[in-house]
Amino acid sequence: MKLYLVQHGEALPGAEDPERPLSERGRQDVQALTEILGAAGVRVARVWHSGKLRAAQTAAIIADRVCPRCRTEAIAGIKPDDSTAEFSQDVDVWEEDTLVVGHLPFMSRLVSRLVCGDPEQELVSYYPGSVVCLERSGAHSWRVLWMLRPDVFAVHE
């Protein structure tokens, strides 16, 4: 089972728009990420997000390519400062590949909890529009397969 953990794309500042939708650059980065995921053959059974606008927009863009027949769904327990304990227990019994769009520091802490058991041990350095692919390698055992960041693959003028 693979778990794709995505930080939402770059959002507008709260002073510009309190809802904090994706910026134009954020949309471009997420679209570029989506093209890479699609070309690599990534397919998931479900796409979940935190319910915040920027995460919902990111999830919708990605879902069109990696889960075209599914609807994105907002789930509880993955807000920026939520504990990763319950989510990490739930994910250990899933059978279907899943993509989750959320926020920092939750996403980084979740990777660390799943891979090394310590949510405070920073293993990956997220950037808006990044994805980390984890694979379950045994009971309660996960490993990082790869990570993509838009500062590596996206081109901005």
Image (cartoon, helix red, strand yellow):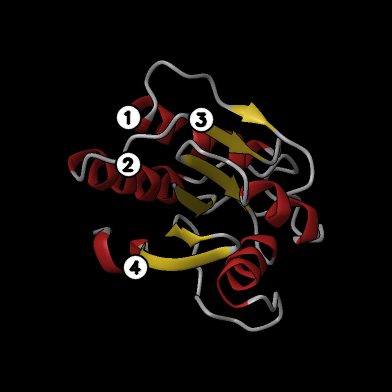
- Kind of element beneath mark 2: helix
Three-letter amino acid code at disc 1? Arg
Residue occupied by mark 3: 46
Q: Which is more N-terminal, label 3 or label 2?
A: 2
Which dot, 4 or 3, sits closer to the camera?
Answer: 3
Q: Which numbered dot is residue 34?
A: 2
Mark 4–mark 2 contact, CB under 8 Å?
Answer: no
Three-letter amino acid code at disc 3? Arg
Q: Nearer the viewer, residue 10 or 105?
A: 105
- Kind of element beneath mark 4: helix
Q: In this view, does 8 lie to the left or right of 65?
A: right
Three-letter amino acid code at disc 4? Asp
Q: How many marks?
A: 4
Which dot, 1 or 3, sits closer to the camera?
Answer: 3
Where residue 118 appears, x then y in whole percent? 69, 79
Where residue 145 appears, x then y in whole percent? 35, 65
Q: In which quarter of the image is residue 19?
A: top right
Q: Which is more N-terminal, label 3 or label 4?
A: 3
The residue under the point 66% across, 44% down is 20
Residue occupied by mark 1: 65
Q: Which is more N-terminal, label 2 or label 4?
A: 2
Mark 1–mark 2 contact, CB under 8 Å?
Answer: yes
Q: Which is more N-terminal, label 2 or label 1?
A: 2
The residue under the point 57% across, 50% down is 11
Most extreme residue toward the top, as rendered?
A: 69
Q: Which of 20 and 50 is in front in this view?
A: 50
Three-letter amino acid code at disc 2? Thr
The residue under the point 68% across, 31% down is 74
Q: Distance between the residues labelled 2 and 3?
A: 15 Å
